[in-house]
Image (spheres, helix red, strand yellow):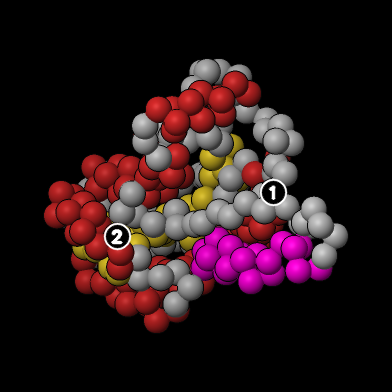
């Protein structure tokens, strides 16, 4: 699928995996709407200026924000691509050590993670896909657009304390096929990437951060390092542009299989 002159939306696009994906899509000629929280405005607007796109201050838990971002993207060109990178994580064990009900995992935190990672992803899909369905087909096969979601290897190898995060990312994996089947009727493809240990700002900076990352990479088969955001972004771009990629969840993780802790 040729995205030159079309628009694309990247959620969580102001930093990390999203930022790298914005740059890759822009290099293919797409006009990218960078959807991120208002606190990321400075970074998002600077990136939008760099790539010739637009920054949309938006929260993926707010449907009106998503619709506004989709309308912004449509002003730049027909919306052909959505890459969902927005997400959060929160560690915590299912029960506490003191045997009290109050020390069990906070249900409000569990709901918060699910609301952003799973429901927010689905809301972005349903709104963006609605806009894509109005496009003129690109070819005789009726292709109108492509969607790429971000899950995690935690969907398969969830570690101790990752109950909410793994549940949210497992949900993203689980809905990939049925949504792809659903949207095939209007020529929209849906794929999911399950990244492993990717070196992004989430790990911080400094000596402690580097020691922490050195410990993480011990279970990676090869290459013996954390992944780069560009490696995620290149796969996301391929899933957008390769018209025969559909309904797949692909691990990009160096062969890592996460241990319990």
Vertical placement of residue 56 versus 253, above or below: below
Indicate the secondary structure of the residue bearing disc 2: helix
Q: Residue at x 62, y 41 (%)?
A: 153
- Crowding at dot 2, Cα within 10 Å, few <14 / some 14-19 / many 20+, comes out as some
Q: Residue at x 47, y 36 (%)?
A: 198
Left or right position of 61 against 164: left
Q: Position of residue 204 (x, y in %)?
A: 40, 40
Vertical placement of residue 222 versus 228, above or below: above
Q: Is 119 colored magenta in this rendering? A: yes
- Crowding at dot 1, Cα within 10 Å, few <14 / some 14-19 / many 20+, comes out as some
Mark pair 1, 2: CA separation: 28 Å
Left or right position of 167 against 214: right
Indicate the secondary structure of the residue bearing disc 1: loop
Write down the quadrant of residue 56 in the picture.
Answer: bottom left
Q: Which mark is residue 161?
A: 1
Vertical placement of residue 224 versus 167, above or below: above
Viewer-nearest residue: 48 or 245: 48
For the record, the magenta segment spans 101-121
Q: Which mark is residue 150?
A: none
Q: Position of residue 74 (x, y in %)?
A: 27, 70
Residue denoted by label 2: 40
Residue 166 visible in the shown view: no
Number of numbered labels in the structure image: 2
Left or right position of 167 against 70: right
Write down the quadrant of residue 167 in the picture.
Answer: bottom right
Write down the quadrant of residue 144 in the picture.
Answer: bottom left
Label 1 vs 2, first from the N-terminus = 2
């Amino acid at each position: 699928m040729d995205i030159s002159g079309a628009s694309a939306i990247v959620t969580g696009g102001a930093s990390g995996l999203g930022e790298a994906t914005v740059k890759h899509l822009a290099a293919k000629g797409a006009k990218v709407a960078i959807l991120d929280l208002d606190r990321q405005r400075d970074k998002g607007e600077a990136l939008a200026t760099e790539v010739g796109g637009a920054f949309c201050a938006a929260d993926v838990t707010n449907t009106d924000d998503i619709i506004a971002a989709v309308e912004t993207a449509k002003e730049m060109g027909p919306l052909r691509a959505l890459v969902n990178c927005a997400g959060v994580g929160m560690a915590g064990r299912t029960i506490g050590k003191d045997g009290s009900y109050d020390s069990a995992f906070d249900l409000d935190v569990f709901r918060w993670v699910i609301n952003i990672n799973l429901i927010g992803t689905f809301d972005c899909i349903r709104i963006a896909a609605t806009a894509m369905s109005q496009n003129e087909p690109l070819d005789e096969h009726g292709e109108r657009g492509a969607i790429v979601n971000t899950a995690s290897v935690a969907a398969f190898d969830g570690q101790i304390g990752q109950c909410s995060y793994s549940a949210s990312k497992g949900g993203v994996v689980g809905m990939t096929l049925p949504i792809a089947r659903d949207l095939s009727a209007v020529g929209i493809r849906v794929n999911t990437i399950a990244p492993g240990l990717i070196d992004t700002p989430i790990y911080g900076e400094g000596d402690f951060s580097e020691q922490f990352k050195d410990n993480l990479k011990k279970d990676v088969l090869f290459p013996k390092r954390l992944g780069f955001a560009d490696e995620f972004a290149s796969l996301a771009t391929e899933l957008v542009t390769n018209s025969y990629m559909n309904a797949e969840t692909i691990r990009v993780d160096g062969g890592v299989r996460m241990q319990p802790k």
